[in-house]
Every structure is written in structure tokens, then in C-alpha cells.
Image (cartoon, grey):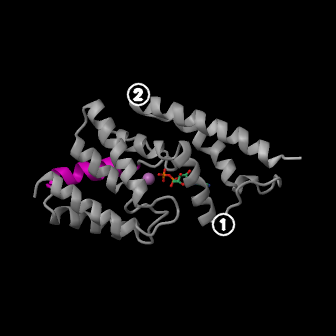
Amino acid sequence: MNNQIQVTKIKEYVFNLFNEDATGHDFYHMERVAKTAKEIAEIEQADTFITETAAWLHDVGDHKLFKNPDETKEKLNVFLRKIGVSDQQVLAIERAIKDVSFSKGANPETLEGKIVQDADRLDALGAIGIARTFAFGGSKGRPIHTNDDQRLHLSSIQHFYDKLLLLKDLMNTSAARAIAQDRHDFMESFLDQFYVEWNVK
Ligand code: ADP
Ligand code: NI
């Protein structure tokens, strides 16, 4: 099976796993991360097949999203072998997707892993990032924002300060850094407008 057909099979696999997600980790998140990662891989001269594949699969087996992460990852390993991805490529893909998550504070060792991490983080920024934040918060029963200091740490607005506004300085590649700056500025304007409307007299 050639790489193109393998990527098509991988897309189908990802579609079946994430089609019904409503926490901001839906199929379209995987698609955007795959597209962005592939673009950055070309600029950075990384292995585009490993980068794109790892990007499609980066949330498979995430502990937040799957009841049995180990079993999910094992099934993925079997699937990749079944479609003819070589042992060496499977290892490279698994290494690239391991610990890309900001919440785990990971520092990927390979260029491909760094690029997937950047692409995933870029999708947490800008207009899409804002939409995903409130979708994720809503799915966990979190308030949008609150005037109650005791509950503020639970709110989706607080997540901007805990994580999202820090991401632009954590990008691994310069291509991602440039995109992140634009999206960061957009979030700052969003927050300015949000407080104007929240504090309406
Ligand atoms: P990853 O696991 O890829 O590092 P997360 O799963 O933490 O990233 O984040 C995925 C999406 O969910 C992001 O858009 C992020 O902003 C949102 N999110 C994560 N944690 C929270 C939270 N506590 N409140 C609101 N949104 C959150
Ligand atoms: Ni992701």
C-alpha cells in the first residue's frame, strides 16, 4: 500500500473515532492539525509522512478522551501494521505523538514531534481556539466566566490565562511562532471585548 492510500485509511480510522466528539477534539481538529503539521513539515524539511500521520493520530489514546488509553493505543498499533506501515515508521509515529500535550508539559525529542505539538497548540489559539475552549468547558460543566472569585479558577475564561496566552512563547518552530502571534493578538482583542460586554452598565 502506498503512503497516499495509507493516509486515506488513517483518515477513515480517525473519522470513526472522533466523529461524534463534542469537546473540541472532533475530526475537524485532527484534520486542521494534520494540514498545519504537513505545511510546517515541508518548511522545516521534516519527514512529511511521519509528521502528517502522527498529526492525524495525535489524540488517539489521550487519557482525557478514552476510557482505556492503553488498549486504544494497542489497537492503533495493530491497525497501522495491518495497512502496511513499516515497524520503523510505526515507531517513529508513536514517538512523535507521545507527550505532544501541553498539559503533560512534554518536550518532544524529534523534529516531527515538535511540529505536531506546534500544530496542536496552534489549534488551541485564535478564533478556533476560542470556540474549542468554550466547547470543552461546556462539556465539563464549567462556567464561561464568573464574578465569584472562589469559582473563577473553574471558568473557561481563566483557561486563557492558565494556558492559551502562554502558548505563543512555547512554539518549537519559527513558522508556528509567526502564526501563533496573529492568533494571540486576536485572542487579546476577544478578551478586551468580552470584558466590555460582561461589565455592561
Ligand atoms: P492537549 O491535550 O492537546 O494539550 P487540551 O486537551 O488540554 O490540549 O486542550 C484541548 C482543547 O480544550 C483546547 O482548545 C483547550 O483550550 C481546551 N481546554 C483544555 N482545558 C480546558 C479548561 N480547563 N477549560 C476550558 N478549555 C479547556
Ligand atoms: Ni489535539
Percent position of residue 20, x then y: 44, 70
Q: Is mark 2 within 8 Å of ligand 1?
A: no
1 or 2: tag closer to the N-terminus:
1
- What residue would you read off at disc 1? 141
Mark number displayed over residue 174: 2
Q: Amino acid at mark 1?
A: Gly
Residue nearest the observer in this picture, 8 or 143: 8
Percent position of residue 39, x then y: 31, 38
Indicate left or right for 112 with 164 as reference: left
Which element type, helix, strand or loop, lies under badge 1? loop
Q: Is residue 87 magenta?
A: yes
Percent position of residue 177, x then y: 46, 30
Q: Farthest residue toward the left? A: 1
Q: Main secondary structure of the magenta part?
A: helix
Which residue lies at the image location 53% right of the left edge and 43% below the top edge? 125
Which residue lies at the image location 74% right of the left edge and 54% below the top edge? 145
Percent position of residue 57, x then y: 33, 56
Q: Residues within 10 Å of mark 1 (few under 14, many from 20)?
A: few
Indicate left or right for 138 with 31 as reference: right
Indicate left or right for 81 with 125 as reference: left
Q: How many marks?
A: 2
Whether residue 23 can be seen here: yes
Q: CA distance from mark 1 to mark 2?
A: 36 Å
Which residue lies at the image location 44% right of the left edge and 44% below the top edge? 106
Q: Farthest residue toward the right? A: 201
Q: Is residue 127 above or below residue 180?
A: below
Which element type, helix, strand or loop, lies under badge 2? helix
Q: Is residue 94 magenta?
A: yes
Locate residue 47: give its quadrant.
Answer: top left
Indicate left or right for 1 with 98 as reference: left
Residue range of the region highlighted in magenta in the rendering: 86-99
